[in-house]
Amino acid sequence: MTAITVPAEGAAARAKTGGRRVPVRVWVGAGVLALFVLAALVGPLLWPYDPVATHLADRLLAPGGRTATGSIAWLGTDQVGRDLFANLLAGARITLLVAGATVVVGGAVGLVVGLVSGYFGGPLDTVLSRVGDVQLAFPSILLAILLAGVLGPSITNIVITLAITRWVIFARIVRASAMSTRRLEYVDSARVLGCGHLRILVRHVLPSCWQPLLVAATVQVGLVMVAEASLSFLGLGVPVDTASWGATVSIGRDYLGSAWWISTVPAAALALVVTAVGVVGDGFRDLSDPRSQI
Amino acid sequence: MGAFVAKRLGQAVIVAWGALTLVFIIVRVVPGDPAKLILGPDASADQLKHVRSDFGLDHPLWRQYLEHLGGVLHGDLGDSWRLGGSALGDTLERFPATLTLSLVALVLTILLGFPLGMLCARRPGKVLDLLVSTGSLVGQAVPSFWLGIVLILLFARELGWLPATADGSLAGVLLPAFTLALPFIGWLARLVRNGALEEGAKDYVRTARAKGVPEGLVQYVHVGRNIAVPVVTVLGLLMGNFIANAVIIEVVFSWPGIGSLMVDAITNRDYAVVEAAVLTMTVSYIALNLLVDVVYFALDPRLTPENA
């Protein structure tokens, strides 16, 4: 999925009202994300999910139904009687893990490549940029499907796959920042004072790259979540014994007529979290855009 | 113009060659032993040897690469071991279905997104505008594979209005095309809205209004023509996106296009077909990008080969 972003439109409106007030929707989005992170970290400890368990008496219970043991399945159960709420929490952990790890790995690679190629320029920059061009000419979903198919399903492989499809975007952003920074006077001054390349890169160029990198990372978190769910939906993502929102949607496909909740619960959760990431990302971008702070 | 097109064409060919190399690396080098990948973990040594010599895998890698490159130039990507025929032939046979799906999705996006954006621009910040901007955010977040399933359930099974899978009719393409288009309808509407608002503040619009041109004409003729340039170029990129994103939609709707062929081939370890499918889609994606560049150049007389 290629990232296509729409230019900020809230910026002008906020400039009129003045100040850097954070709009309510960004707070709501941040709240949803905080809840999601909490659910992913703590949830599976409180409601453990057993991927191989079968409780045939409790199959296809509707949300709020009572199981044989007397507990209430708030989000219903699936075709072998596993509780969907526990499944949702376990899936949240995978989603968070994959999205976090991918953005950290892809971001780190992109940061190093972008810094080196933007700061030093020259033939190395040309080579790295051309490699990036080739990769961007590839629709990222195709590359992800191809890599995931070859590597086989595992959480590590899916992180590698998605990080490979994302690093270019980070590298581009960091490269642009590094290129504009290296011409600034304070960088020249540092060089005149005798600083080495490494010190200039880390102490003087890097700080100006953080903000665009973090804004891009927020946007990418949402895209990576959708990509992971899509791959797991196709059966190319996480292994079968791991709960994943995309995989659960895929399982629920066959029961949609009789048990709509199996597919709908994880899909709705994914949509909610990705929307929240989008809202927070927009707010973050507006805040970090100096034009909106005038 | 000629020099510009030649330069871009050259770049596109280089990028296509790079993509070809990347696919070669992923399929032949990453897995270690492609023969094991084809046969699975339980293959005997004899079988492995047989497959290696069949596919030329016992040659050194550079020779395999050159042979592969030569094959591609002759339109030969090897044979599909599962379908029997030539991999490229099987893939191209499925290409029209994917193209139809993407084209209908593109038409839907334009027909719904453009007027919606114009309507939003008339009253920015009002109910419709807020609805569309929220809808576009949610539309991009809802997983398309789930949306497809829900649409099948609603329109095919419950209401019985549209067929759930391809039956060759126009009605059959509507559901998958709409699923593909939905995330981008709101996106296009926002793009058109922002463009229309920006253009609407310019002097020529004020002049048109002052001389009494009806508001509808001002919006669709004066403003519309000026936002057409960025919108037309974006549509080419959208088409490329549709072709790639169709992979998942095709699986959901059992649409007989390249995407479902490719996912099938991956699960069956039919790597010649996988390579052919990825290459076909990538080359059409690159070609569309090239077309966008050329159209943009042709539409905007301010551009010269140097500043384009």
Image (cartoon, grey):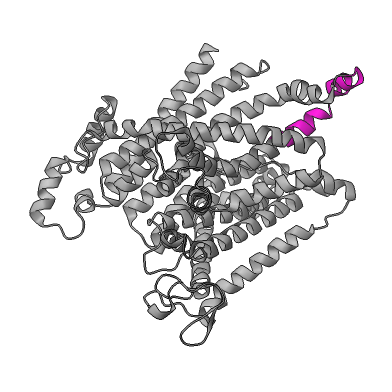
Residue that appears at 63% across and 57% down: A277
Q: Is residue A142 left or right of residue A290?
A: left
In front of the other: A233 or A43: A233
Estimate the x, y position of residue A94 in percent, counting from the top left. Answer: 48, 66
Estimate the x, y position of residue B91 in percent, counting from the top left. Answer: 31, 34
Name the quadrant containing residue A33: bottom right
Q: Is residue A209 visible?
A: no
Q: Is residue B63 left or right of residue B300?
A: left
Name the quadrant containing residue B106: top right
Estimate the x, y position of residue A29 in percent, counting from the top left. Answer: 69, 61
Q: Residue furthest bottom?
A: A69
Estimate the x, y position of residue B88 in percent, counting from the top left. Answer: 28, 32
Residue that appears at 17% across and 41% down: B55
In front of the other: A107 or A112: A107
Above or below, B82 against A215 in this view is: above
Residue that appears at 71% across and 21% down: B225
Does the segment drawn in magenta span residue A5? no
Q: Is residue B259 left or right of residue A111?
A: left
Above or below, A74 against B109 in this view is: below
In front of the other: A108 or B3: B3
Above or below, A43 against A195 in this view is: below
Q: Residue furthest left?
A: B46
Does the segment drawn in magenta span residue B201? yes
Q: Is residue B105 visible?
A: yes
Residue that appears at 41% across and 60% down: A254
Q: Which residues are magenta?
A: B192-212
Q: Main secondary structure of the magenta part?
A: helix
